[in-house]
Image: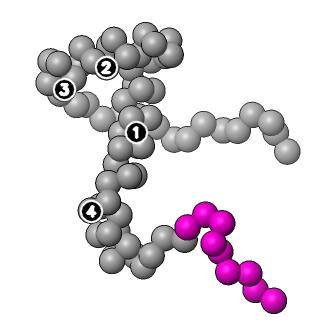
Amino acid sequence: MAIVKRPPESVNRWLSLEKPVGELLDGYRKFPDCAPDYVANFALGKTLARDPEYRKRKAAKNGPEPVEGTAKRSR
């Protein structure tokens, strides 16, 4: 098994950011010294995944998501 995993597939999206948000992104990306795309992807992923209203809506459509460490074991 390879130690290095294949990176996730990327999809190009063109977004317009409000000026203060764009400046925040440009400034923040210097902190961990990485690309603005990476910072935006990471921040959006974390923020959107934690949105409680979205999680409720998603659970209502797809059924509840399993919580880590609480999976039922079959005998």
Q: Is label 1 in contact with label 4 (beta carbons under 8 Å)?
A: no
How far across and how far down the image is residue 52, in percent?
A: 32, 60
The magenta region covers: 67-75
Q: Residues within 10 Å of mark 2 (few under 14, many from 20)?
A: some
Q: Is residue 71 above or below residue 3?
A: below
Q: Which residue is mark 4?
A: 53
Mark closer to the chain start, 4 or 3? 3
Q: Is residue 28 left or right of residue 20?
A: right
Say which of 14 and 29 sits in front. Answer: 29
**Amino acid carrying mark 2 in the image:** Leu
Q: Is residue 22 left or right of residue 29?
A: left
Q: Which residue is mark 2?
A: 25
Q: Which residue is mark 1?
A: 11
Under circle 4, the secondary element is helix
Give me the C-alpha separation between circle 1 and circle 4: 25 Å
**Amino acid carrying mark 3 in the image:** Leu
Q: Quadrant of residue 59?
A: bottom left
How far across and how far down the image is residue 53, in percent?
A: 27, 62
Q: Is residue 40 above or below residue 65?
A: above
The answer to whether residue 71 is magenta is yes
Mark closer to the chain start, 2 or 1? 1
Mark closer to the chain start, 2 or 4? 2
